Image (cartoon, helix red, strand yellow):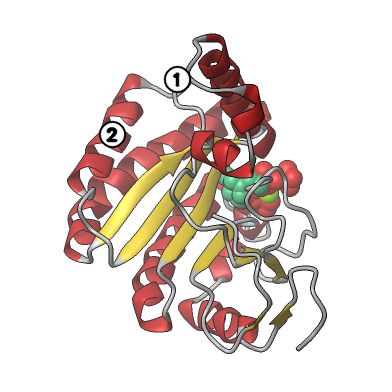
Amino acid sequence: MSNASLQTTTSAPRHVAIIMDGNGRWAESRGLPRIAGHRRGADRVREVVESCPELGVTHLTLFAFSTENWKRPEQEVQGLFRLLRRYIRQESARLVAEGARVRFIGERSRLSRELQALMAGLEEQTADNDRLHLTVAINYGGRDEITRATRRIAAAVKAGELAVEDIGPDTIERYLDTAGLPDPDLVLRTSGEYRVSGFLTWQSVYSEYSFVDVRWPDFTADMFAAEVRGFGRRERRFGAVAG
Ligand code: IPE
Ligand code: IPE
Ligand code: MG
């Protein structure tokens, strides 16, 4: 959903999206295998998720695995998916109790049946919740998402369900994995890298960015709260002049 009005924010970002980066370097700098960093990273996810409601953050989107991450050694890829399966199994009850509605974005067909079933199960279990909208991006890439949406739009046109002249930004939004979710107000990346690596390409055109020089396994709930507060001091103009 676009939010194209002039807005000088003094409030919390409604939707925060996080590129959780730096797990590998965190582990390597300690002489540990990279997967140890991913494991510690998963603990940080829990803390950040829990802190959202009190900070006024209603939507949290997390980048867990990109369409490019398949290029990593098989062992690391398998380790990451093992952690994702474990996270879903272990956190389900807590997420339900916390009133989180969980959605997954990304291309699922390449994921194992077991993981796909866990994902669908958690989405179903939490479908009626709305205290926190938690979206997890797995095998996600912004270009891949837009490409898949374009194919479906083309198929709808071909089937006579959609007229070419009726296609607008709102049509495209409806075909994206994030259909129905607000655009991220704040996109945060840890680890000191200044890039977005294909995260929420369409959705983040007017997002505020924050690049934090801390590796994800060291990123605490207090640091998250500081970023959320920092957002409140920014002036968003959306192309208009300052008021
Ligand atoms: C982020 O940490 C987690 C994933 C991409 C899955 P990295 O694994 O990218 O850690 P670095 O960037 O190599 O330190
Ligand atoms: C982005 O991190 C993807 C996730 C955090 C899941 P990467 O570590 O994969 O990104 P690059 O390779 O530094 O761009
Ligand atoms: Mg990285």
Tags 2 and 1 in contact by the CB under 8 Å rule?
no
Q: Which residue is mark 2?
A: 120
Judged from the image, the secondary structure of the residue bearing numbered disc 1 is loop
Q: Which residue is mark 1?
A: 109
- The quadrant in which the N terminus is found is bottom right
**On-image quarter of the C terminus:** bottom right
Q: Report the residue at 73% width, 51% height from top.
A: 196
Q: Is residue 122 above or below residue 165?
A: below
**Res. 168 in view:** yes
Q: Who is closer to the viewer here, 195 or 41?
A: 195
218 sits to left or right of 127: right
Quadrant of the rendered image containing residue 173: top right
- Residue drawn at (22%, 63%) of the image: 99
Left or right of 214: which side holds 53?
left
Q: Secondary structure at mark 2?
A: helix
Is residue 33 in sight in this rendering? no
In x, y percent, where is residue 54?
36, 82
Q: Is residue 93 above or below residue 149?
A: below
Instruction: Please tell me which residue lies in front, 123 or 179.
Output: 179
Tell how many labels: 2
Residue at (75%, 75%) from the top-left corner? 237
Q: Residues within 10 Å of mark 2 (few under 14, many from 20)?
A: few
Front residue of this view, candidates 111 and 233: 233
> Label 2 to label 1, Cα distance in Å?
12 Å
Q: Looking at the image, is 212 positioned above or below residue 65?
A: below
The tag earlier along the polypeptide, 2 or 1, is 1
Q: Is residue 12 left or right of residue 99?
A: right
From the top left corner, tell me how far across and down residue 77 is, in percent.
54, 32
